[in-house]
Image (spheres, rainbow, N blue to C red):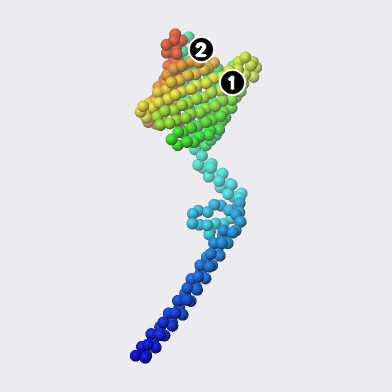
Amino acid sequence: MAPRYAAFAALLTLFAHIGPTHAASHDDDEEDEDEDEAEVVEAPASPDLVPPAAGAAATAKPADPATTKEDEAGDTADTAETALGLSLSYYAMRSEADFLTPVLTLDRGALHLETRYNYEAIHTGSFFVGYTFSGGDAVSFSITPILGAVYGDNSGVAPGLEASVSWKDFDFYTESEYYIDHHNHHRNYLTAWNEIGWRPIPPLRLALVTQRTRTVDEGRDVQRGALLQWTLKRGATLGINFFNPTSERRYTIASVAVQY
């Protein structure tokens, strides 16, 4: 029996010696990790550090600020969307000569470029530059302040605004400008186009429209009408406007718009 007790006592002594050693080693590791974490937390933030991905803080390295800006500029240029739009509006008049108004737009990211003809006046062109601010989720909006140069039979400058708000199947759109003539301030005027629209089905849009313009001289300061638009599968939109429908001076605008 004595040898058994001696062997058992030896095993207990061995386990008692290994346990504290392993615990001490584990505690040392934890202390080292704590020191490392303390060093990371206490290190001052560097403005040159690129924000690391989640879980990769230990491998984050200082980045060259110049290189980072170039890369960001390249990424922005690659991801900026470009949209080209063209609309043609044919004014079928009763008491004046008919005319066509083409509008060409180019959007590159937030940059907005636009050129028009027969919009501010007959035989007059204009070119605009603007910047678009947009956002929203349930209610989305887009606001584009613009500044334009007018040339032709009339010449001057025209600051303006294009804006839209949409909620579910309803939307509001407005575009306005104040024309300032270079030669005669009596020709200065405000022109505006406003729409309140509703889509009963996705391709169809119905809208109430008001406009104030010098292009159409109908003896009214503000003209009112109705708009019907139909969007085709390829993105083209057909439209027809009826202005002053109860007046002897009524007229119609037929339009087509495409966007690439």
Residue at left 49%, top 38%? 81
Q: Is residue 61 above or below residue 9?
A: above
The x, y position of residue 40, in whole percent, is 56, 60
According to the image, label 2 marks what residue?
220
Q: Is residue 92 above or below residue 138?
A: above
Q: Against 212, is 95 above or below?
A: above
Q: Nearer the viewer, residue 251 or 100?
A: 251
Image point (53%, 68%), residue name:
31
Furthest-bottom residue in this view? 2
Q: What is the three-letter code of the residue carrying label 1?
A: Tyr
Which of these two is toward me, 153 or 184?
Answer: 184
Which of the image's four quarters has the N terminus? bottom left
Q: What secondary structure is found at the residue carrying circle 1?
A: strand
Say whether residue 65 is left or right of residue 171.
right
For mark 1, does the 10 Å Cα neighbourhood hold few (<14), some (14 to 19), or many (20 or more) residues?
Answer: many
The residue that mark 1 highlights is 179
Using the rendered image of the protein, determine whether residue 204 is visible from the camera's viewpoint. yes
Apparent side of residue 123 relative to residue 195 in the rendered image (left or right):
right
Tell me where residue 210 appears, x and y as whole percent. Answer: 47, 19
- The residue lying furthest to the left in this view is 1
